[in-house]
Image (tube, rainbow, N blue to C red):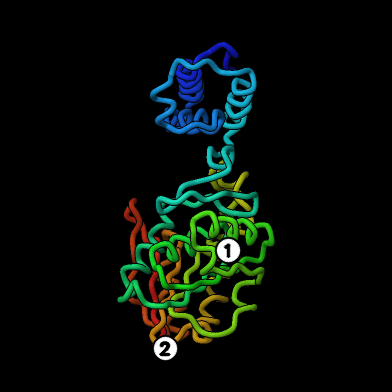
Amino acid sequence: MSDPLATRDQALRQLRRTLTDAGFENAALDARLLVLAALDISATNLITRPDTLLTEEQAGKIAAYTSRRLAHEPVARIIGEREFWGLPFTLSDDTLVPRPDTETVVETALQLLPDHQAALTIADLGTGSGCILTALLYELPRARGIGVDRSFNAARTARSNAERNGVGERSLIAVSDWASALAGRFDLVVSNPPYIASSVVLGLDREVRDYDPALALDGGTDGLDAYRVILADAARLLKPGGLLVLEIGYDQADALQRLAADRALDVLRIVHDLSGNPRCVALKRT
């Protein structure tokens, strides 16, 4: 959609107008991210050299990115990565796009761990892109962790992201159906499992429904299937006094507390996200 002789700034303005006219709420940010990715330049480079002419290849890439965005493909999917906890994460078709609300899991775990210099052991169940485990290892310099995912492609992506962010030597990624392949006990277990009721999945926003993997969304009839599996394994996985921190749906806090009571787990806190909704539950093995 961009003239091959257009400048960077002209291309950015044109894309912003196109997305605005199409009704995209974050048109300015989307346009900026797409242009930066298409040109493979930094934000500073774009600001300081706005009058640089596009090549035909660059213009073609911007046009292709524009078409994909107009089809409501998420920007993170188009450019192939998303920032989480200030770190870059590569995406694949088998991984969720990391969301800001999931940072609540990382923040809560860090708040509850008394010694960030301890040689902790961490398990991340359904690791996906590896964003939770990688962020925790980034903040806990002596910790070691394992992330498991039933998808080979997701596990491969998580492995790549751990290495990309400098924690590869302290992490192991395995293909496993939840904790079935894990032995030993951990100081901390974390998870952002699928928690959307099956009947609700088809009604999700198209950018989620059409582009996020169904296995990472569908939590069964009541959205709680994965939690039942994880909580049933909690006593085996956690050291005495170990922590379990889970992302939850906005309406699942009461149900999680009931499930936890059946497994002799103490609920330490329910944490709300930036929108004020319950988003994370922290539990402790008694």
Q: Where is residue 69 in the image (x, y as percent from the top left)?
A: 57, 31
Q: Tell me if mark 2 has few (under 14), some (14-19) or many (20+) residues whose alpha carbon lies within 10 angstroms of its own.
A: some
- Compare marks 1 and 2 and give the one earlier in the sequence: 1
Q: Tell me if mark 1 has few (under 14), some (14-19) or many (20+) residues whose alpha carbon lies within 10 angstroms of its own.
A: many
The residues bearing labels 1 and 2 have C-alpha atoms spaced at a distance of 28 Å
Q: Give above or below for 87 relative to 38.
A: below
Amino acid type shown at disc 1 = Gly
Residue shown at the point (50%, 31%) measured from the top left = 41
Circle 1 sits on which residue?
219
In the depicted view, which residue is nearer to us: 253 or 48?
Answer: 48
Q: Give above or below for 29 relative to 143.
A: above
Tell me the quadrant of the picture where the C terminus can be found.
bottom left
Residue shown at the point (60%, 67%) measured from the top left = 173
Name of the residue lying farthest toward the right: 152
Residue shown at the point (69%, 61%) measured from the top left = 152
Residue 59 visible in rendering = yes
**Tag on residue 137?**
none
Q: Do the residues labelled 1 and 2 touch (CB within 8 Å)?
A: no
In the depicted view, which residue is nearer to us: 73 or 91?
Answer: 91
Is 151 placed left or right of 82 in the picture?
A: right
The quadrant holding residue 283 is bottom left
Q: What element carries label 2?
A: strand
Amino acid type shown at disc 2 = Pro
Q: Position of residue 123 (x, y in %)?
A: 51, 73
**Tag on residue 240?**
2
Residue shown at the point (56%, 49%) measured from the top left = 90
In the depicted view, which residue is nearer to us: 259 or 86?
Answer: 86
